[in-house]
Amino acid sequence: MKKMVWFAVVTALALAGSALAQAPGSPAPAPAPAPKAPKAQAEKAPAKKPATFPFRGTLKAVDKDAMTLTLAGKQKDRVIHITSQTRFTKDGKPAVLGDGVVGEEVAGSARKTEDGRTVAVSVRFGQAPQKSGAAAKSGKKSKTEAVP
């Protein structure tokens, strides 16, 4: 019987306390702020640089005025645009656009722009530099070449 009375008193106090907390005329508790939408976070993220891809072929034409290289293709020629940031090399040394010779091998890396043009990031005129000695044959250092 004591337990029932004790339970009734505790329950009554709990109900009275909650009723007083939400008395008429008192402001309702403010709702928690809604979490920000992920879309807003995506808009703030910096734009990624377009991925680069390799190109390789035979140089068909160099146009210094239009700042383009034309590579001969089996079915269609490819035009690669040059910018002021394009890096040129020839025989392992720095070069310029005018160092390209029609008919020689050309290779490098490029990226696509938003308007669909192919823009060169780096260009190598001529054959790729050759590796020397046994490293050229195996692609690895031999045990005799290794530094302790």
Image (cartoon, helix red, strand yellow):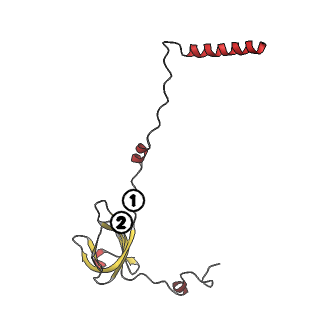
Dot 2: element: strand
Relative vertical location of residue 105 with respect to residue 9 in this rendering, above or below: below
Residue drawn at x 48%, y 24% is 30
96, 54: nearer the viewer: 54
**Can you tell which quarter of the image residue 20 is in?**
top right
Neighbour class for label 2 at 10 Å: few (<14), some, many (≥20)?
Answer: some
> Label 2 is placed on what type of residue?
Arg
Residue drawn at x 46%, y 34% is 34
What residue is disc 1 on? 49
Where residue 140 appears, as percent x and y from the top left, is 56, 81
Horizontally, residue 38 falls left or right of residue 113, namely right
Where residue 121 appears, as percent x and y from the top left, is 36, 68
Q: Which mark is residue 35?
A: none
Q: Residue furthest left?
A: 65
Horizontally, residue 65 falls left or right of residue 143, namely left
104, 146: nearer the viewer: 104
Horizontally, residue 12 falls left or right of residue 50, namely right
Residue drawn at x 42%, y 49% is 45
Sequence-wise, the earlier of marks 1 and 2 is 1
Dot 1: element: loop
Q: Are marks 1 and 2 in contact (CB under 8 Å)?
A: yes
Where residue 54 appears, as percent x and y from the top left, is 39, 72
